[in-house]
Image (cartoon, rainbow, N blue to C red):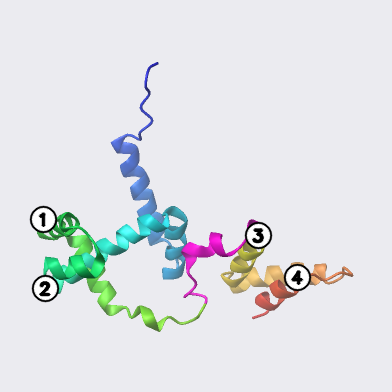
């Protein structure tokens, strides 16, 4: 039986990567970017990226390979690869590490930002997802959009039965 190659071409990969970068650059805030990345990446992929960034931080801070291996539980080859990227160019790594120094992640503004986006699917059964999605849409809506939502809510208030979800959305829209 003949094998078929289902891999994407290099051109398609580059185009999709560029489109992802454009999408990330158009996010309104770090939370939106985190939501996009958490949808795209598995936990393991996110962990790999986090470890590479941490390795870059530690290398740029002058830490030794043995210390990094012990702290992050990574192979010497992984550290060597990151170090090679830093020595060859490393513009992206250096920029990211510099920006991470400026940002104090522990000082996030609200507890909703602190949500562990990776565990959303594990924490909530599938039947809660529409509610969660609707709540997030309302929370991130502009004032004009919230006025439209309030208009729809006022129409729904004429009905006799009010669900808990209805009351929650109304509360969010009126904030």
- Helix, strand or loop status at disc 2: loop
User: Residue at position x 11%, y 73% from top?
Assistant: 62
Q: Looking at the image, is mark 2 or mark 4 nearer the viewer?
A: 2
Distance from disc 2 to disc 4, alpha carbons, whole Å, reads 55 Å
Give the spatial CA distance, label 3 vs label 2: 48 Å
The circle drawn on residue 175 is none
Please identify, in this view, whether the residue under mark 1 or under mark 2 is nearer the observer.
2
Residue nearest the viewer, comparing 166 with 75? 75
> Percent from the top left, x then y, of residue 53?
26, 64
The 10 Å Cα crowd at callout 1, few under 14, some 14 to 19, many 20 or more, is few
Marks counted in the figure total 4
Residue identified by numbered label 1: 88
- What range of the chain is rendered magenta? 112-128
Q: Nearer the viewer, residue 126 or 16?
A: 126
Q: Which mark is residue 62?
A: 2
Q: Horizontally, is 7 left or right of 151 in the view?
A: left
Mark 4 — residue? 166
Disc with the residue nearer the chain's start (4 vs 3): 3
Query: Cα distance, mark 1 to mark 2?
Result: 17 Å
| Most foreground residue, 158 or 3 | 3
């Amino acid at each position: 039986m003949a094998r078929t190659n289902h891999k994407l071409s290099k051109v398609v990969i580059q185009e999709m990567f560029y489109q992802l970068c454009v999408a990330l650059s158009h996010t309104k805030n770090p939370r939106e970017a985190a939501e996009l990345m958490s949808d795209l990446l598995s936990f393991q992929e996110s962990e790999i990226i986090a470890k590479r960034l941490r390795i870059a931080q530690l290398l740029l801070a002058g830490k030794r390979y043995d210390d990094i291996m012990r702290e992050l539980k990574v192979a010497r080859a992984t550290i060597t690869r990151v170090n090679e990227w830093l020595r060859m160019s490393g513009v992206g790594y250096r920029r990211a590490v510099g920006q991470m120094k400026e940002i104090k992640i522990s000082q996030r503004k609200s507890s909703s930002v602190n949500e562990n986006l990776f565990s959303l699917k594990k924490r909530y059964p599938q039947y809660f997802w529409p509610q969660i999605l609707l709540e997030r849409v309302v929370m991130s809506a502009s004032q004009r959009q919230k006025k439209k939502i309030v208009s729809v809510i006022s129409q729904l208030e004429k009905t006799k039965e009010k669900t808990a979800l209805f009351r929650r959305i109304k509360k969010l829209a009126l904030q």
